[in-house]
Image (cartoon, rainbow, N blue to C red):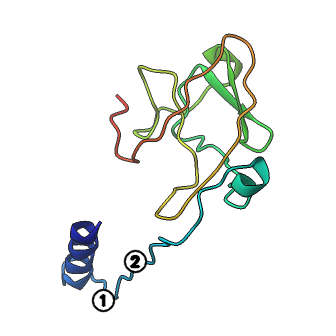
Amino acid sequence: LSSYIKKVKETCKSDKMGIKTTVHAKPNRFLLDPKTRDDFLKYSAQLSFDAETAHKFLRLTEENRKVTNTTPWQHPYLDVPERFEHHRQVLAAESFYLDRHYFEADISGDGAHIGLTYKSIDRK
């Protein structure tokens, strides 16, 4: 983590970026590990999905909070560079940085895969 913070500080000081700022990390090492659902809910995050990244077979509804596996002609998406092409994937609109985060998912049908990734993941 300290090497990452150092790299971010160096990048922010660069004249090429046009950014002059100070970066401070606030690791919270004294948090107790959550044990109950109520403990986890203290770190809950409401997620929505980024429609620009949704694979053409995925339909977003309920203010982009629900993803359904479907057919592309039911919801034609524009072809944009951010869109996933090969695997049925979609990124969350929110990003997670440091600290703890908790979310719950309701899954039905044949199931789903949920994972964490980075924004620059290959999409084409």
* Side of 64 where 25 appears, left or right: left
Q: Residue 28 carries which label?
A: none
In which image quadrant can residue 63 be found? top right
Q: Residue at x 75, y 18 (%)?
A: 108
Q: Point out residue 95 in the picture as x, y percentages from the top left corner.
A: 52, 56
Three-letter amino acid code at the position of disc 2:
Ala
Front position in the image: 93 or 2: 2
Three-letter amino acid code at the position of disc 1:
Lys
Q: Point out residue 61 in the picture as x, y percentages from the top left corner.
A: 76, 35
Tell me the distance, in whole angstroms, between the alpha carbons under discs 1 and 2.
17 Å
Q: Which residue is drawn at 75% across and 30% down?
A: 106
Q: In this view, does 24 lie above or below 35?
A: below
Mark 1 and mark 2 lie on one chain; the one further toward the N terminus is 1
Task: Quickly name the residue at label 1.
Answer: 20
Q: In this view, does 34 lie above or below 59?
A: below
Front position in the image: 43 or 114: 43
Q: Are marks 1 and 2 in contact (CB under 8 Å)?
A: no
Q: Which mark is residue 25?
A: 2
* Secondary element at tag 1: loop
CA neighbours of label 1 inside 10 A, class few (<14), some (14 to 19), many (20+): few
CA neighbours of label 2 inside 10 A, class few (<14), some (14 to 19), many (20+): few
Residue at far top of view: 110
Q: Point out residue 110 in the picture as x, y percentages from the top left corner.
A: 67, 10
Looking at the figure, which quarter contains the C terminus? top left
Q: In this view, does 78 lie above or below 47?
A: above
